[in-house]
Image: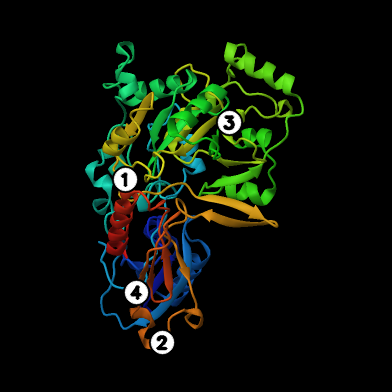
Amino acid sequence: MTNRMTVRFRVYGIVQGVGFRPTVDRHAAVAGISGSVCNKGPYVEIIAQGDPGRISSFRTLLQEQPPKRAAILKIDEKPLEETTVYDDFRIVVSEKTDGEIYISPDIAICDECAQELYDPGNRRYLHPFINCTCCGPRLTILDLLPYDRERTSMKMFPMCRTCAEEYHNPASRRYDAQPVCCNDCGPQVYLLPSKKSTGNRNNSTDTLRGRDAITAARRAILDGGIVAVKGIGGFHLCCDATDEEAVHSLRLRKRRPAKPFAVMMRDEKTVLRECLLNEEQRQILTGHQKPILLLDRKTDSDKEEKAGIKAEIKAGFIERKAVSGADIFDSASADDTVGSLLAPSVAPGNPKVGIMLPYTPLHMLLFRYDDGLSMPDCLIMTSGNVSGAPICRDDADVLAELSDFCDCILSHDRLIRIRADDTVMDFHRGHPYMIRRSRGYAPLPVLMSEEKLFFEKKKADAGKTSILAIGGELKNTFCITSGNLFYLSPYVGDLEDLRTVRALEETVARMENLL
């Protein structure tokens, strides 16, 4: 190749944990170039070799067709006087180097994985941990950078042969997806014996795993019980949000007399039945971050009809839809005109209610499963902690803190490295604003121009400056600065409790290690 040239690209931004290297590999194949791509930590480095026309085509693909969840901030390009001739294009072993870090937050389940979850012909049918390069845990499983499986809590789960083939196949949606797993090789769900469940000899739950555990948790919710559910960044306390007795019981047990509970709704149709929703709010609610969004409630125009519908659901007079595909697990649902089915104690006296959609496969399975149970389409999903303490993260936490008032504890064996409570957002004058910035957004940094930095440093020293800002005692979130990047942590909590202080210290240490 007489006019061969070699160019080094360095791509900065959210380029870890979003399938960037597999995408680059595919673009290289389309453009017909050789070379390599390597994750350096702060950036992805690409060596591209080919004639000028092919390099130009590759550059266009890189700029215009990044992965869905990537965010490119800048691309540095430098021609190299390269003597090495590359025969092909390959993903090479990650290397860590100093520089600006952009760690991907955890990403809600994507539409493709959600379809596979309910496809009986798919080998990940009803798999509680289905994920791909576009979705799944990121920050909360991360031990060290660069982001590779051996530096996450997924290293405990060696891939089976089929998952490994997908992981190494450039044509697969799971090509180089670090948390990839299936029912055969991935984490497992199981029930922990809460003190309330072990007190009933006929309700022993300490040996239930997998399918039996999920069904037992669903049945406990249907029976008006309170279930602790382990998610991506910690435990939730869950109960039927349409059952006033269950919601009132949760308030008594958690000693939370009036503060509104967050509600997870099965789908957008359910949200439209309960709340007013404009297009801007819909995009945030259904996006890949899936925060809790404060929405205006619809007023009950026909309470008698509402009561009648609820009675029919409870009595089982409304049957599940007998259709094929994902809808086979749809529970009984009321028409949009019925009015709100939410229990009064969900958000007493409040014109708004905090709503989120399911963002993990396990959440989706609580609503829809092939066990014959018809579940409510609204579930309380409030932070799994006692008043003043941080959100429970592991089995030891939940057994010590929540076992006394849970009827059932649905856990799993994928370790959570950093707690990440749910993000809470509202709208003001037509624009979204953060109330609590956490899961789905943290620890993405805020980029501050050097002219606006509150400390005075010479420009040459700006990149060397690092500051830890601990934050306030109430609703604590800390911040680590590196030059003009401000990394905000996930939500920590109120520091009046020693347990929260210890959680803060642990999270600071882990974030400092990552950054």
The front one of 221 and 100 is: 221
Q: Is residue 256 above or below residue 133?
A: above
In the picture, the disc for residue 466 is: 4
Instruction: Indicate the secondary structure of the residue bearing disc 2.
Output: helix
Which mark is first along the chain, 4 or 1? Answer: 1
Q: Which residue is mark 3?
A: 345
User: In 3D space, how far apart are the residues under numbered discs 3 and 4 (Cα atoms)?
Assistant: 46 Å
User: In 3D space, how far apart are the residues under numbered discs 2 and 4 (Cα atoms)?
Assistant: 14 Å
The front one of 200 and 308 is: 200
Which is closer to the viewer, label 3 or label 4? 3
Which mark is first along the chain, 4 or 3? Answer: 3
Q: Which residue is mark 2?
A: 459
Q: Amino acid at mark 4?
A: Ser
Which is closer to the viewer, label 1 or label 4? 4
Q: Is residue 256 above or below residue 426?
A: above
Tell me the crowding category of disc 1: few under 14, some 14 to 19, or many 20 or more residues within 10 angstroms, Cα based. Answer: many
